[in-house]
Amino acid sequence: MASHDDIIDKERSKSAFKYVEDIAPGLRLEMDLDKIHHTSISDFQEVQVIDSYFGKTLVTDGKTQSTAHDEFVYHESLVHPPLFWSALLSGTTESDGTRIPGSAPKSVFIGGGGELATAREVLKHNSIERLVMVDIDPKVLEVCKRYMPEWGGEAVASHPKMELIVGDAHKYLMETQEKFDVIIMDISDPIEAGPGIALYTQEFYQRTSEVLSKPNGVFVTQAGSADFIPHPHAFPEDDDDDNKESWCFSPILNTLATVFDHSIPYTVPVPSFGECWGFVMAFNGDAKEARALADLPYEVIDNLIEERIEAVPGVPDHKYRSKGVKFLTGKEKGSEALKHYDGVTHRGLFSLSKSLRIAMKGDKRIMTVDNPVFMY
C-alpha cells in the first residue's frame, strides 16, 4: 500500500505551470512551463524567455518566435535559399545549362531578426562583406544576447562585418541610398496590434525592389502559417465578417507578385510553431528562372555549401539536443556547419502540397497601406 507521502508526490506530479499559445481559432498549443528566465514589457511588446517542451524559447506578445528545438530549421530556411540564388543570378550559365555562381552576395540587409540567428546564418557565407541589421526593439536584442547566446549573441552582434542598428527598418530602407544583394525580412507577423504591418505592404515592397542590386537582387520574407492541409479559417470567404484575421501567406505572395517578376512561395515544418511555416522569395529576371530555382539539382546546392559556408566562431551551440541534429563547435565548414539545409532539403522546401497550391490560387488578396491583411 502506498504511503501518504507517495500519494502526495503522485498528485503533485500531475500539476504544473503551463505555457499555452493560441495557434488558430479553436486551436491551442499547451505544454509544461519548466522555467521563466526573463519577462518584461518593452516600448513595443511583451518579451519573455522560457524553458518548455521545446527547450529555451523566445516569446513576444504571447507568440513563440523561436526555440532551441528547431530555430535552425526556420533560420536556415529563411537565409540560405535567397543567398545562394543571388550567387547563381550573379553568375553565368554554360551552354549545357550548368550554372556557375558569381561573387554575390556581398551585401545583405536584415529587417528585424532580434534573436540574431538570421544574422548568424548570413555570416556563415564567406562571400559576405557587409551585413546591416535594423531591429526596432532594443529590449529584444538585450534579452537575446543575455539569455540566448546560442542564437548568435555578442559573437554575431559585434562581428566585424555586421552593422547593428536599433531603429525602424521601414524608415531605413525608405531613406537609404545603399544597394543590397539580398534583403531579408525576419519580422513579427502582421497582427493588428503589432509593429510590423507596414513591412508587408505593396508600397514597402516597391521600395525594396529599388534598393536591391541588379541583376542578382533577391528579396525574402517570413510569411506566417502555411499548413500542408489548409484549415477553412486560413482563407476567409468575402462575406465572412467574423473572420478578418487569417493566413497572410498567399496575400504576401500576391502582393510581391505585383512588384517583382517572380514571387516564389516555400514552406517548412516548424514543430514549435504547431504548423508549417511559409516564406516568399521575390526577384526579377527571365520567366524560366522561377522554375529553375525550385528545380536546382541537389549537387548545385551541396557544392555551394561546401565552397561558401563556414560556422561563425564564438557562438555556443544549444545544450538542448534534438535527435539527429549535430553539435557545432564554431570551427565547422561546408555541410558540417549546417544542421538542416542541403540540396535534398532545398527541393523539399519548394514542394507545396496540392491542397495548399489550390487554396492559394483562389486567394486574390493584395496587402496595401489602405487595405492591410491581419494574421491571427
Image (tube, helix red, strand yellow):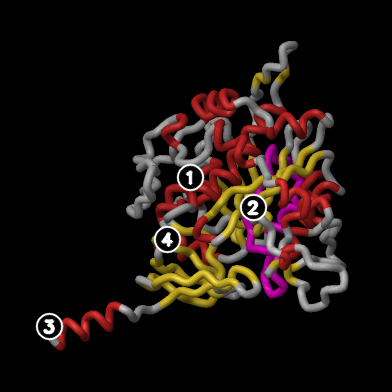
Specify the amino acid type for callout 1: His
- Badge 3 density bin: few <14, some 14–19, many ≥20, Cα 10 Å: few
Tell me if residue 6 comes above or below residue 319 in the rendering: below
In the rendered view, does 269 fall on the left or right side of 34?
A: right
The answer to the question of whether label 1 and label 4 lie on touching residues, with beta carbons closer than 8 A, is: no
The answer to whether any part of residue 111 appears in the image is: no
Q: Please check the rendered image and state whether residue 131 is part of the magenta-colored stretch, yes or no.
A: no
Name the residue beneath numbered marker 1: 159
Specify the amino acid type for callout 2: Phe
Name the residue beneath numbered marker 3: 1
Q: Quadrant of the N terminus?
A: bottom left
Residue 270 x, y percent position in the rendering: 54, 54
**Which element type, helix, strand or loop, lies under badge 3?**
loop
Closer to viewer: mark 2 or mark 1: 2
The answer to whether any part of residue 237 appears in the image is: yes
Residue drawn at (60%, 24%), measured in percent from left and top? Answer: 300
Q: Earlier in the sequence, mark 2 or mark 1?
A: 1
Q: Which of marks 1 and 4 is nearer the N terminus?
A: 4
- Residue range (magenta): 169-196
**Which element type, helix, strand or loop, lies under badge 1?**
loop
Residue 341 x, y percent position in the rendering: 52, 38
The answer to the question of whether label 2 and label 4 lie on touching residues, with beta carbons closer than 8 A, is: no
Closer to viewer: mark 1 or mark 3: 3
Measure how far apart labels 1 and 4 are at the Cα level: 28 Å
Specify the amino acid type for callout 3: Met
In the rendered view, does 271 fall on the left or right side of 316?
A: right
Q: Which of marks 4 and 3 is nearer the N terminus?
A: 3
Between 159 and 357, which is closer to the camera in this rendering? Answer: 357
Between 52 and 31, which is closer to the camera in this rendering? Answer: 31
